[in-house]
Image (cartoon, rainbow, N blue to C red):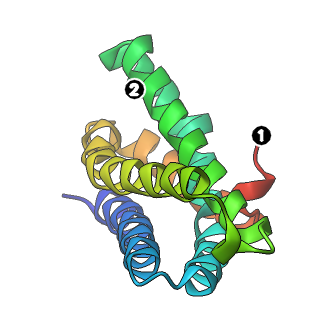
Amino acid sequence: MNETSSRLKKEFLQDHRLLTQGFANIQKAIRENNWKKAAKIAERIDRLVGSHIEFEEKVLYPIVAKERGKEYASRLYREHSLAREALIKLIRSKELERMEPEEKEEIIQKVETSIDHAVSCGTLLSHLTALDEEKQKEFLERLLAFRQTHRCWSELS
């Protein structure tokens, strides 16, 4: 494995650890009925991984669509959308403890889907590491460039 491939792999997996751990921590806070803590964690995830999500949606998922089909890629985009909705709901709701049980359950379901997605999406790394060295270098540069924008996930459409 060359240095570029190794760094691309490291950066990609690091982002997925942040996502997985973040959503797991949100889930734990919700189970403890600590919705304010869940909202704070959601704010942190929103700030930290927006650039990674943008990279996946603009760079990685088009490759995945070609290799694994548009239906599979569409599912990945939908899962991102559900996770984003959960984060936004947690961040923007003023009275989280007073939400209706149905609203809470909807957030819980979206968080669980988000955990599953973060874990399984990490396996998509093979689509990047299978690229030739020049493409891997380009994609690493693009991932790092997205990070420089510091865009929040909630800002992505």
| In this rendering, the label closer to the viewer, 1 or 2 | 1
Percent across and percent down for residue 10 are: 33, 68
Residue at image position (60%, 40%) is 81
Query: Relative to residue 80, is residue 69 depicted above or below?
Result: above
Residue found 28% across the figure and 64% down from its top: 6
Residue at the limit of the structure toward the left, as seen here: 1
Is residue 29 visible in the rendered image? The answer is: yes
- Which residue is disc 2 drawn over? 64
Residue 70: percent from the left, percent from the top? 44, 13
Q: Amino acid at mark 1?
A: Ser
Q: Secondary structure at mark 2?
A: helix
Q: Is residue 107 above or below residue 94?
A: above
Q: Which mark is residue 142?
A: none
Q: Type of residue at label 2?
A: Val
Report x, y in % for residue 45. Answer: 58, 72
Q: Residue at x 32, y 60 (%)?
A: 9
Residue nearest the observer in this picture, 102 or 153: 102
For numbered disc 1, what is the local secondary structure?
A: loop
Give residue 157's mark: 1
Query: 109 or 7: which is nearer to us?
Result: 109
Looking at the figure, which quarter contains the N terminus? bottom left
Q: Residues within 10 Å of mark 1 (few under 14, many from 20)?
A: few
Is 118 located above or below residue 10 in the figure? above
Q: Is residue 141 visible?
A: no
Q: Residue at x 35, y 45 (%)?
A: 133
- Total marks drawn? 2
